[in-house]
Amino acid sequence: MLRGIDPLINAELIHVLMLMGHGDELVICDVNHPAQSIATSTTYGKLVNVSGCGIAQAATAILKLMPLDTFVEAPVRRMLVVDDPDRQVPVFAAVQQVIDAAEGRRVKMEGLERFAFYEAAKRSFAIVRTSDPGPYGCFIFKKGVIES
């Protein structure tokens, strides 16, 4: 164990976060997402599991260490509900609350159609799968810089 690091952040996840640079993207997803198959296309090339927690818990732990990009309008993207893109599911509001609190400001989140999300996820740095049952717990976080 290390001081000041949430126990949800396992050794592999901290390694991934340290490898990522400004503009790299991290997918945080639920158990329904085809994470294993998509992860092989990412920069990291394999799935990172953080079993035993939900999306909001994982995002809270990750965003204590990783800033979001301030150079883009929407540093967080989420999957839209299939056939009902205006529908809101509870995880959307939960993650919005987490990212706003982590950044100390309102952070814009934009939606992507299901297959557009999958393609964007393939171009990400890594995929982090939680135990969240979903549905639609699929988010892409763009890493920012730490200003001195």
Image (tube, grey):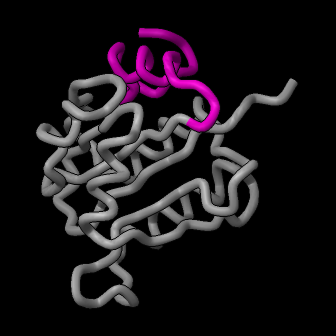
Q: Is residue 137 left or right of residue 51?
A: right
- Give the residues drawn in magenta, as a range: 1-23
What count of labels does the image hold? 0
**Where residue 90 sits in the image (x, y, percent)?**
36, 75
- Any magenta on residue 109? no
Q: Is residue 5 left or right of residue 78?
A: right
Q: Residue at x 29, y 50 (%)?
A: 29
Name the main secondary structure of what is drawn in magenta: loop
Q: Residue at x 30, y 37 (%)?
A: 128
**Where residue 99 sits in the image (x, y, percent)?**
58, 55
Compared with residue 42, is residue 84 higher up or lower down, i.e. above or below? below
- Any magenta on residue 16? yes
Q: Is residue 104 left or right of residue 136?
A: right
Compared with residue 56, is residue 78 higher up or lower down, i.e. above or below? below
**Where residue 123 sits in the image (x, y, percent)?**
37, 41
Quadrant the N terminus occupies = top left
Quadrant the C terminus occupies = top right
**Where residue 44 sits in the image (x, y, percent)?**
33, 23
Q: Quadrant of residue 117?
A: bottom left
Q: Residue furthest right?
A: 148
Compared with residue 54, is residue 90 higher up or lower down, i.e. above or below? below
Q: Residue at x 62, y 61 (%)?
A: 74
Q: Quadrant of residue 91?
A: bottom left
Q: Residue furthest top?
A: 1
Q: Quadrant of residue 147?
A: top right
Q: Residue at x 28, y 79 (%)?
A: 81
